[in-house]
Image (cartoon, rainbow, N blue to C red):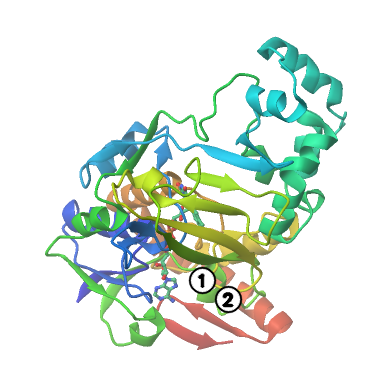
Amino acid sequence: MFDYLVVGAGFAGSVIAERLARVAGKKVLIVDKRNHIGGNAYDHYDAAGILVHKYGPHIFHTNSKDVFDYLSQFTAWRQYQHRVLGVVDGQFVPIPINLDTVNTLYGLSLTSFQLEEWFASVAEKREVIRTSEDVVVSKVGRELYEKFFRGYTRKQWGLDPSELDASVTARVPTRTNRDDRYFTDTYQAMPLHGYTRMFEKMLDHPNISILLNTDYRDVESFIPYGEMIYTGPVDTFFDNCYGKLPYRSLEFKFETHDTKVFQPTGTVNYPNDYAYTRISEFKYLTGQEHSKTSIVYEYPQAEGDPYYPVPRPENAELYKKYHALADVTAGVHFVGRLATYKYYNMDQVVAQALKVFKRISTGDEVQGAKSKRTLDLNTKLEIAVDTAKTKSSTVRNGRGTSSS
Ligand SMILES: Cc1cc2nc3c(=O)[nH]c(=O)nc-3n(C[C@H](O)[C@H](O)[C@H](O)COP(=O)(O)OP(=O)(O)OC[C@H]3O[C@@H](n4cnc5c(N)ncnc54)[C@H](O)[C@@H]3O)c2cc1C
C-alpha cells in the first residue's frame, strides 16, 4: 500500500515525493512514462562522453534562497552566468538588447544615458499594452522589434507577437548598460555533477519506489494508494473533455564536433534565419573539459511532447475550466508546469511543489480534500453533466473513469 502515487518524476513530482518520504514518513510510488527520472531537466553523457541535456539547455537561476537551499541538500554547484548572443545583420550581438547591441548594430558610440534617449526617440506610443508586440515596440521601437523579436517569436510559437499575451516578451528585459548576462537572479548555478545525479540523490530513500516506462493509467487501477500527485498535462488527465489545451513542442537535433569550441557563447539565437531558433553548446553550461564539443539545435513544432503552454487569453479561459474540475477532484493534487498549464521555470516548480507539500503536511489539504469530497460533490456532478452535454465525453476522477 502506498500513501501516494506520484505521476511524473520531474521537478514537481520528485520534490513532493522527497518531502513526503523524508519529512512526512510516507510511502511513495513514482511512475513516469519515460525511461528516466528528472523530467525535462534530465541530462546524460552522450556517445562522445559529453554531458548533454536531452530536452534542451536547462540553466538554473532563482531569487529564492529557500529553493536554492533546498536543492543544495542534493547537489554541489558550479557558478555559471549564462550569456546569449544573437546573429542579426550578420553580426553577433548581445541578447537581451543592451548598450553594446545598439552600438554594434548601428555603428554608434552612445552612452547609457544617450541610449535611454535613443530608445525614447524610436519607441512607439501604445495606450494599452496587450500583446507581445505592444510590449516591445513601446520600449525599443519597430526596427529592433523586427530584428530581434518578430521572426524569433513566429518561429518559436507559430504565431505573430501581435497574437500572443504581453507576458511572453515581457520576460525579456532591455538594458541601457553593458550587462550581457541573460539572467540577473541572485543564485545562478548548475548542479556540479548534473541534474540527473541531483535527482538520484533526492529520490534515494527507502520509502520511495520508482516505476519507469509506465503510463500511470496502465497501473493505477491495481496499485493500492491513498492520494495522487499528478504532474502530467491537466487536459489529458480529464481525457481532454473540454478540448485539448494548446502546447508548443520542440525537436532537438544533437551534434558532436571534433573541435574544442563550436560557438562564442552558451547559446546563440537566430531570430531571422533558418528553421531552428537557437544553438546551445553544453560545455559552456557544465564546465566540462573535453577535446570535442556537443551542441543542440532547437526546431519549434506544433505537434510532439507538450513543452510550452501557449499564452493566449482563449487558452487561459479553457484552462480555467480544467482548473475548476481539478479543484473538485478529491484526492488528487495537481502540481507543475503541465498540470497547472503555466510557463514555469525549474525554481518556480520547486517552490510550487514545496508549497503544496506544506499544505498537505499541515493537514489543510487533507481537511480540504475531505470537505471537497462532500461539499463539492454536487459541483463536480454539475460540471460532469455539463461536459457530457457539450462533449458527450468521459470524465476521469482520481479513482478511475466514470462515464457520465
Ligand atoms: C527547451 C526547454 C528549456 C528549458 N530551459 C529552462 C531553463 O533554462 N531554466 C529553467 O529554470 N527552466 C527551464 N525550462 C523549464 C523546465 O523544464 C520546467 O520548469 C520543469 O522541467 C518542469 O518540471 P515539471 O515536473 O513540472 O514537468 P516535467 O519535467 O515535464 O515532468 C513531468 C513528467 O511527467 C511525466 N508524465 C506525464 N504524463 C504521464 C503519464 N500519463 N504517466 C506517467 N508519467 C507521465 C512526463 O514523462 C515527465 O517526466 C525549460 C523547458 C524547456 C522545454
Q: Locate the C terminus by quadrant.
A: bottom right
Q: Residues within 10 Å of mark 1 (few under 14, many from 20)?
A: some
Q: Residue 143's quadrant in the figure?
A: top right
> Residue 88 or 215: which is nearer the viewer?
88
Q: Looking at this view, is 368 or 356 the one in front?
A: 356
Count all numbered tags in the image, as a single digit. 2
Query: Mark 2: which amino acid?
Result: Leu
Question: Which residue is rendered at x = 68% and y = 59% of the image?
Answer: 274
Q: Position of residue 9 (x, y in %)?
A: 34, 65
Q: Is residue 382 above or below residue 73?
A: below
Residue 183 on image: x %, y %:
50, 34
Ligand 1: image quarter: bottom left
Which element type, helix, strand or loop, lies under badge 2? Answer: helix
Q: Is residue 373 above or below residue 61?
A: below
Residue displayed at 58% across by 52% down? 278
Kind of residue indicated by mark 1:
Leu
Report whether 283 appears left or right of 303.
left
**Cβ of mark 2 under 8 A from ligand 1:** no
Q: Residue at x 46, y 68 (%)?
A: 232
Can residue 129 be seen?
no
Q: CA distance from mark 2 to mark 1?
A: 6 Å
**Above or below for 10 versus 32:** above
Residue marked by disc 2: 381
Query: Is residue 237 found left or right of 226 in the rendered image?
Result: right
Q: Which mark is residue 377?
A: 1
Name the side, left or right, on which 77 lies relative to 396. left
Residue lying farthest to the front in this orientation? 258
Q: Which mark is residue 261?
A: none
Residue under the point 60% across and 59% down: 309
In the rendered structure, are the residues bearing label 2 and label 1 in contact, judged by CB atoms less than 8 Å apart?
yes
Question: Nearest the camera: 199 or 319?
Answer: 199
Residue 243, image quadrant: bottom right
